[in-house]
Image: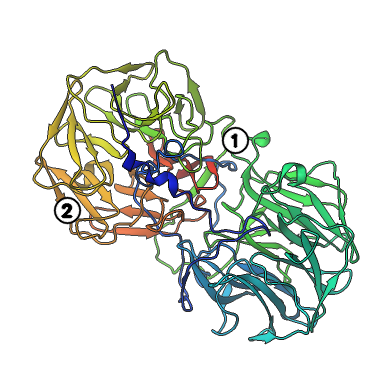
Amino acid sequence: MTDPLDSDERWFAHLLASIPAPASLDSWTPAVTTHPRPRPRRRARLTPLALALGVAVLVGVVGAGLGVVLPRRGGTSPAQTANAVIAGMPPARAGAAMAADPAHHRVLLFAGRTPGGVLLGDTWSWDGHRWSREPLGGPPVRAAAAMAADPSGGVVLFGGAGVTGALGDTWRWDGRSWTAMHPSAAPPATPAPLMAADPATRSALLVVRDPNSAAPVSTWSWDGHTWARRPTTAAPPSCAAAMAADPGSRRVLLMTGRSCPGVAGGVTWSWDGQAWTALHPAASPPAVDRPALGGGAGRLVLFSPEPDPAHGCSARLTWTWDGATWSAHAPPVSPPSAGAAATDPGGGALLVLTTSGETWRWNGAAWDLGEASAPSQGTSAPTLWSERAPAGCPPARTGAVMVTDEARHQVLLLGGSASPLGQVPLVPGDTWIWDGSTWTQLHPGPAPPARGGAVAAYDPLHSVVVLYGGVGLDDKGAPVAFDATWTWNGSAWKRQAPKTAPPGQRLASMAWDPGGRTVILLTGASPQSAQTWSWDGAEWTRLHPRTTPPFGSLVTAPDLGGLLLASPAGPDGQPSTWSWAGGDWHRLAVAGTPATSGAAIAYEPSAHRVVLVGGDCPAGHCPTDATWTFDGHSWIQLHPAGAPPPRAGATLAADPTRAALILFGGTDFTRLWGDTWVFT
């Protein structure tokens, strides 16, 4: 039987807010919060959230469809590892401006937006080995500004998205400080301009969306003192995504993005100092909205975090331009995400600062993490993420179910949503297993209908995986919260027929209770509506504990108290950690519970700890790449090398074939991930 969602649960469908990162010159949504100058931090990562893509995303189950969240993305090969930059790292950010400063043999980084949406106004410089924070003072906070080498020395900055909207100011960096410029002519204020050094004219070339022009964009040049508009007979569309100088041809190349209409996306445009020309190379990168583009090792290099299925289900490609066409490279290790990019004047490598705050360099053949201060001696061995690139993999999704099948030494994956916002369409009701190196799709007989946001747990007493709930569609295409219970025995699904069952819910969490030797299910978004149920292998029984916690993510942790729950909120509004014992919930006096929803959570048996990954911030639509661990006493945020890109709605489970955890899928609310990661 089913229990349709009631109308007041459809509110999330109205919260389809745009993602605050400039996809092109067309638009930029400035952050509404400001921040004074951020303090230098040892390492900044996006703020975490607790599991329940079913919570933040499943709550968004309905409305324009039905809510669940799904993944997308790709990878590289089994892990070549590198040491992450440790000291003096700029905080994680998107929409930063970065440019080479050849006069001072530096790369300059300015401003951007934190994962929580706070606008920054800090300045950093890279000397070829490490980042240094420059003194305070300079342009107001902003994101998506344009920056390039200044013909008179230093760096010139223009525009961006500030607190009040689009900016049209010009600033110059002289190697020590910023100076506001007051040119006699200036381009229109623009929230997401593009700028690059123009080798042909020894000026800085600027492209802005121009509401006062018949053309979609206008082209300007900066000579070190003033701006001059360049008349052109042809111009790129306003959906331009990235622009940089080509070291080989000494021309400026511009790439259009995925937001372009029709065939206008993914087009390469060339500026020869006088005019724009649309090129037609034999091969081109796919259209993406936020690639990293710049000169590296004598070639123009484009990196995109978008996976290319033609090169494997997890392949992220690096493209190089030879003056006539693009060539694709699939290095064994790649940055987990794109970000600000510039050529390092010291060695000629392309420098990329990912949105998670990692510094990567392209040396012409491979990517490596930038150098910085080494960890202090005596520190423990670092934990590492590594991306896998199996020959085949499940389609990208969010809000899926993934659980360790201990009896078969496999990981089981089922369901999810094929929408970045966790809505329809749903992934078909497919069943996949991971054997430690390969994904295999199974084709059992009767199987659970397509759904997202279901919950599952392994029942060691009966050697089956138990599946409950989720949100799907009824025969008329309307959203439905399922209340059916299914079990998986390694070869077939079986729908159970208990005499009673928990009501269908969008928000639920489930795990095995080692103490009571039953499966425990927690449903409901608040302590007032929450219910606790147990499954004994044949029947559901509603329990009546004296205390009921807020909704959160359940995880079986045999060495840490048995059954634990991490909630992004407690009765006092603060994140909280709970245990289930003696038929009641108990709030633990532990510090640092992550305030994240839609995170992935699992127990790591080899390390005797709980691991929580990703999630969404309390404000919503700001996914994180943070990795947290719980040892029974406190939550600790780790800073492992090569973490997966920010996401919510991913799935995490112990890999029974090795001492590791496996992560799959998720969403950043603009795209789905379909990548497979291993954490050790």
Tell me if 521 is positioned left or right of 253 in this view: left
Task: Please tell me how crowded label 1 is: few (under 14), some (14-19), or many (20+) other residues with Cα within 10 Å.
Answer: many
Which of 436 and 204 lies nearest the eye of the viewer? 204
Tell me if 300 is positioned left or right of 376 in this view: right
Asked if one can make out residue 680 in the rendered structure from this viewpoint, the answer is no
Tell me if 593 is positioned left or right of 198 in this view: left
Q: Is residue 582 above or below residue 482?
A: below
Residue drawn at 44 percent across, 56 percent down? 382
Asked if one can make out residue 565 in the rendered structure from this viewpoint, the answer is yes
Q: Which amino acid does the dot numbered 2 rest on?
A: Arg
**Quadrant location, the N terminus:** top left
Residue for badge 2:
587
Circle 1 — which element? loop
Which quadrant holds residue 99?
Answer: bottom right
Residue 537 point in image, percent of width and height: 20, 22
Residue for badge 1:
313
Circle 2 — which element? strand
Alpha-carbon distance for marks 2 and 1? 42 Å
Residue drawn at 57 percent across, 48 percent down? 80
Which of 195 and 182 lies nearest the eye of the viewer? 182
Look at discs 2 and 1 and give the one toward the viewer.
2
Tell me if 174 is positioned left or right of 456 in this view: right
